[in-house]
Image (cartoon, rainbow, N blue to C red):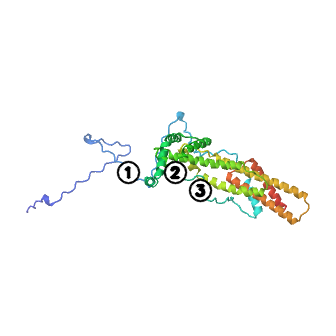
Amino acid sequence: MAASPPILASNMATPPPPPPPLPMMPSKGSVSAPPRNGAAPPPPPSPLPMMPSKGPVPPPPPPTKPLKNGAAPPPSAPLLGPRRPITRLKRSAQMGNLYRTLRKKMEGTNQEGPIQEGKSSQAKRGLTGNSNGEKQGMADTIAEMTKKSAYFQQIEKDVKQHAKSIMEVKAAITAFQTKDMTELLKFHKYVESHLEDLVDEGQVLARFEGFPTKKLETLRTAAALYLKLDAVVTNLKIWKVVAPLSQLLDRIEPYFNKIKKEVEAFERTKDEEAKKFQSHSINFDFKIIVRIKESMVDISSSCMELALQERKEMEAVEKKETGGSKTERATKEGNNTKLLWRTFQFAFRVYTFAGGQDDRAERLTRELAFQIESCLQHQ
């Protein structure tokens, strides 16, 4: 038997080594055998990485500091909003109902729901305006020097002549801070007395490096605003409430409409203005807005008193007079009722604007409403 030819190693592929045996999991309560030859046991498999969620991962809560005796931490304090200014005006429980009832009887409407005061028109301009103290660029300065050399020479003269006083004003404005409006007006007058003689304030002050131009503008804005609001308070305080009532309402109603628009426009930007003033160390006294509203309520109450007084005088005259037709008396009665209703409408608008009324206005609105209903019953 012939022997088989030898198999060449190069003609055959080397088979892969067998896989290592799977480790045996120890059963419960069993103890794994120590590794042979003193080899260290293999490390445990690393945990699988967590897939990130779609949303952001919330930060871990801050650690709670332990308190003494194991007491629980106190609850967090509630966030408090800005304090409302103190005023003698308050919301009325009867004003809205009286207005709705009288309006239904006078105008024949059956309107339910909230009373619309009307969309307030956008103020054409606020109480504060943009200042015109922007610095001219270098090109404008050169052009001014070229075209009007005499004017430029006057600027240079002011720079030299008023340098000492301007430096004093610069230091005073930089250090100025106040919450007293009387002091604000006094300081504003002092500043203006030193700058009013300059031929071109912007050009002259630009020669003094670091002059607080923005604070000067804010100072002027705050002073002008307070003067305007204070003039409204003064005007309302000295307003003469005299008969006849119809002419009084013809004068006061347009003035009230003007004040209402300006105050509401200012209140929409009050927080922004307050931040601007405070950034320059001026704490503006916004309580003057409350004084305007309180003064307006006083005017409204005086109008109601005059309306009730004229009504009593009219009733006294009617008792003495025996002549006149029923038509004439009815016409006179109707006109007086309409005037009383007009007065009540004005009082309600003032109440809505001011956000409340005092005890005097509360009593007068109740008396006026009773008088109007009494007139309607006798018509």
Residue located 58% across and 47% down the image: 222
- The earlier-in-sequence mark between 2 and 3 is 3
Compared across the picture, whether 361 is left or right of 285 comes to: right
Mark 1–mark 3 Cα distance, whole angstroms, equals 63 Å
Numbered disc in front, either 2 or 3: 2
* Residue 282 seen in render: no
Mark 2–mark 1 Cα distance, whole angstroms, equals 63 Å
Disc on res. 133: 2
Disc on res. 318: none
Residue located 77% across and 62% down the image: 106
Q: Is residue 107 above or below residue 55?
A: below
Q: Which element carries disc 2, helix, strand or loop?
A: loop
Disc on res. 49: 1
Instruction: Say which amino acid is labelled 3.
Output: Arg
Compared across the picture, whether 173 is left or right of 298 comes to: left
Numbered disc in front, either 1 or 3: 3
Q: Are marks 2 and 1 in contact (CB under 8 Å)?
A: no
Q: Which residue is mark 3?
A: 125
- The earlier-in-sequence mark between 1 and 3 is 1
